[in-house]
Image (cartoon, rainbow, N blue to C red):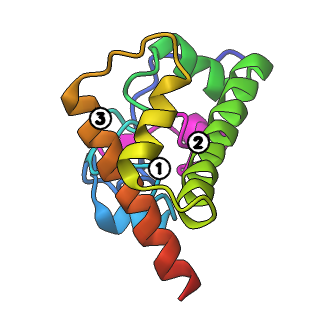
Amino acid sequence: MIINLFQKPTEKCPRCLGKGFVDNDDINRLNKKLEWASGKCAYCYEKGKVNKLTVSNIPADLSYLTLERTKIERWKLILGNKKAKKRAKLYQENLNDLINHISKQYFVGELDFETIADLHFARFEKHNVSVKEKKEFIKYIGEVVKERKEKFE
């Protein structure tokens, strides 16, 4: 079977529902509240349509598929490359671990948002994070805490 890599989009994008961008309704529908932000749709590259091969081989809710992924990595996923699938699985596991780690530090360790952020960034070689990066992460910690509180109330 020969695969036409230049096949034109043929189906409405299941991630953004054809809009070309992901909004809060899409994020909630796909249960990705703590994993995604609103913005350009990485599934269809903002076109609103995708080819059938993409739909059949990549779940619309795959968090690993972002605009930062190369076209080569995208095609590896579409074609079912085992290493690309493994990277996608590891990415999801790491994201889940981060969310669980933040929850545990806040609810069990009773740490404040800034301390959680400091501990997170201390794990990396690059300890000098910008004020903007730290503020964005603290905001994310707040979102995790809010979501977890709502989930268990």
Residue, far right: 82
> Which labelled disc corresponds to residue 134?
3
Q: Earlier in the sequence, mark 1 or mark 2?
A: 1
Residue occupying image coordinates x 27% and y 51% = 38
Q: Amino acid at mark 2?
A: Leu
Q: CA distance from mark 1 to mark 2?
A: 8 Å
Q: Amino acid at mark 3?
A: Lys
Q: Amino acid at mark 1?
A: Glu
Left or right, 74 with respect to 89, comes to left
Q: Earlier in the sequence, mark 3 or mark 2?
A: 2
Q: Which residue is mark 1?
A: 35
Instruction: Find out whether residue 113 is within the magenta segment.
Output: no
Q: Which residues are magenta?
A: 47-64
User: Residue 79's spot in the image, x, y percent?
Assistant: 68, 23
Q: Which residue is mark 2?
A: 95
Closer to us: 122 or 96 = 122
Instruction: Find out whether residue 55 is within the magenta segment.
Output: yes
Q: Earlier in the sequence, mark 3 or mark 1?
A: 1
The answer to which image quadrant residue 112 occupies is bottom left
Q: Secondary structure at mark 3?
A: helix
Q: Is residue 34 visible?
A: yes
> Which labelled disc corresponds to residue 66?
none
Closer to us: 28 or 59 = 28
